[in-house]
Image (cartoon, rainbow, N blue to C red):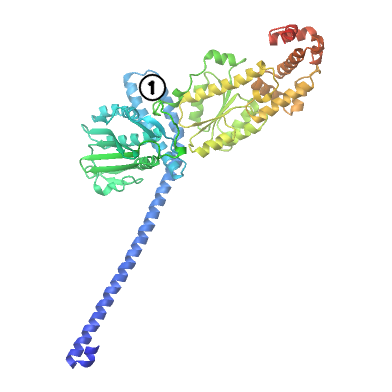
Amino acid sequence: LCIIVKSPFWLSWWALLTYITIILISTFYIRRIALFRISMKNQLHLEHIEREKLEEINQTKMQFFANVSHEIRTPLTMLLAPLEKLMGSDPNDFQKKNINYIYRNTKRLERIVNQLLELQKIENTQLKLKASEIDLVKFLKEIISLFEETALDKKIHLSFEPSCDELMVWIDPEKMDKVIFNLLSNAFKFSLPEGLITISINKNRIEGNDGFFTIAVSDTGNGMNQVHLGRIFDRFYQIENKVTGKTTGTGIGLHLSKELVEKHHGTITVASREGFGSTFAITIPLGKKHLATDEIFQTQSTQSIYPHEIKSEFEKMQSPITEQEVEEQTDSGKTLILLVEDDIDILNYLDDELSVDYHIIKANNGTDGWNLAFEQVPDLIVSDIMMPGIDGLQLCKKVKSTIETSHIPVILLTAKTLVENEIEGLETGADEYIHKPFHPRLLKLKVDKIIEAREVLKQQFAKDTSFIAKEMTVTSADEKFLQKAIDFVKENLSDADLNIEKMSSVLSISRVHLYRKLKAITNQNPTEFIRTIRLKQAAYLLSQGKLNVSEIAYMVGFNSHQYFTNSFQKYFNMSPTEYSRKS
């Protein structure tokens, strides 16, 4: 401005034009910068919205797949159970080969279902680490052995390279099994014939610390572009294969593996080069200082370290009771079992499995199941949870809260695997809770053991001379009922005409249900029950030595001295006089 005012005319105009030009250029660039900042802000906002939408889509996917997984578990039961039975029936080589193909792929489907449910547990913070000290070398050998047949079929060399013969580490075997199994499955999936898959173990000590160990799974497969490595552990991430032109997804396997490794306070990394294969490395601290108290499941090393998928749970249980024991437990006909299941295939399959040793009645919904339970009073109920009308939980609660049926044990079958679902089932009074898919022999063993335990309680009433109902019952409702029945008989011992009509009236229960309930709890009908209480009381009075045999017989309701003596002799294997002398 000074130049414009004090300079010659031509110079002033030049200076003015220069000044105006600088102002215009500055304004232009300031506006560009402002627009750029607004654009960047909008872009970041859009990216944030996109990320939120993507996460929402992933959550929706997870919820959808989790719901579908529950539904898949029922048909899975109908696939696995007959398959496992066929595998044990000595088929010919051709049949065995095809059965193995079906079995392997069915187990693969089961693993996928379990992965989805496992991931749901992690996201709901319900999955807890259960670490125990195991030999990692032996653990990995058992997992690798599962892939030896696959390696032969695909002509892939499988190598295990541990740095030591034994390495004791603190891990959750069940969860680490899923991680290693998934990494090996992926390695075989992307490896070509004549390729090499290597599993190695290395131990690293750090001064002043226990150090860490590393499990590496390497393959000579297709490998991955560096662009994908940062997102390889994302759920449902898609990768385009330039060789085949196909798009493959990582699904949830690697994401679940990462979550499970981090549960162990470790890390999982990947190194890959397109065309040269990939290496996944798991690094976890040695020792147990890094573990919380509630994460330590076992403080001593164990011989059985690997919850092998092929080693079914039923193999860990005791052998089933013999046919002779079953015959000794029943006095007339077979034990009555009520099956309640809305899936007709499973209902009929359970019938086929259990009808060999037990008498079966069936219902395909909870309402019919309750009606049958009340009318027939079975010895055991096996019920699904997810059913139309009255579901399994409501059925179980109704059975356990009704005096006529409260003594009946209940086994619940369900596809729901969350801890809350199991707690909810057990809180209703269920005696057992079995997850689908289940092995048929496992269910059979559970049924056998429950029936066996109930028979022991029945026999206890006959052998024990006490009148304490708690020692002879399982549920509080049964305890109250039995104690009330015992007290009623004791109060009316001298009444020689005491019978089932009087007892059913006082106990507010029909004659039919009184008969069935006493038979179920004590293995005696009402007449035998009354006579047993009379004889037990007579034995107590004889032990006191204050009254003679005739007086005691009359006091406990026996009008005939001879009938009393014969009954006492049969029950205690000695005469009243001998019992009194020994006492």
Identify residue for label 1.
Answer: 87
| 579 and 564: which is toward the camera | 579
At 39% from the left edge and 26% from the top edge, which residue is drawn? 310
Q: Secondary structure at mark 1?
A: helix
Decide if residue 477 is on the left or right side of residue 425.
right
Label 1 Cα neighbours within 10 Å, binned few <14 / some 14-19 / many ≥20: some
Q: Is residue 248 above or below residue 482?
A: below
Q: Is residue 304 above or below residue 565?
A: below
The three-letter amino acid code for the residue at tag 1 is Met
Q: Residue 158: image x %, image y %?
A: 25, 30
At 29% from the left edge and 39% from the top edge, which residue is drawn? 281
Q: Quadrant of residue 578?
A: top right
Whether residue 386 appears in this view of the structure is no
Q: Is residue 520 above or below residue 423?
A: above
At 56% from the left edge and 16% from the top edge, which residue is drawn? 326
Q: Residue 1: image x %, image y %?
A: 25, 88
Q: Quadrant of residue 554?
A: top right
Decide if residue 447 is on the left or right side of residue 195.
right
Decide if residue 497 is on the left or right side of residue 227.
right
Q: Residue 537: image x %, image y %?
A: 75, 17
Which residue in the rendered view is the most extreme toward the front? 208
At 44% from the left edge and 31% from the top edge, which residue is drawn? 299
Placement of the C terminus among the 4 image quadrants: top right
Give the number of callouts: 1
| 461 and 75: which is toward the camera | 461
Q: Residue 300: image x %, image y %?
A: 43, 29
Whether residue 88 appears in this view of the structure is yes
| 393 and 547: which is toward the camera | 547
| 134 and 417: which is toward the camera | 134
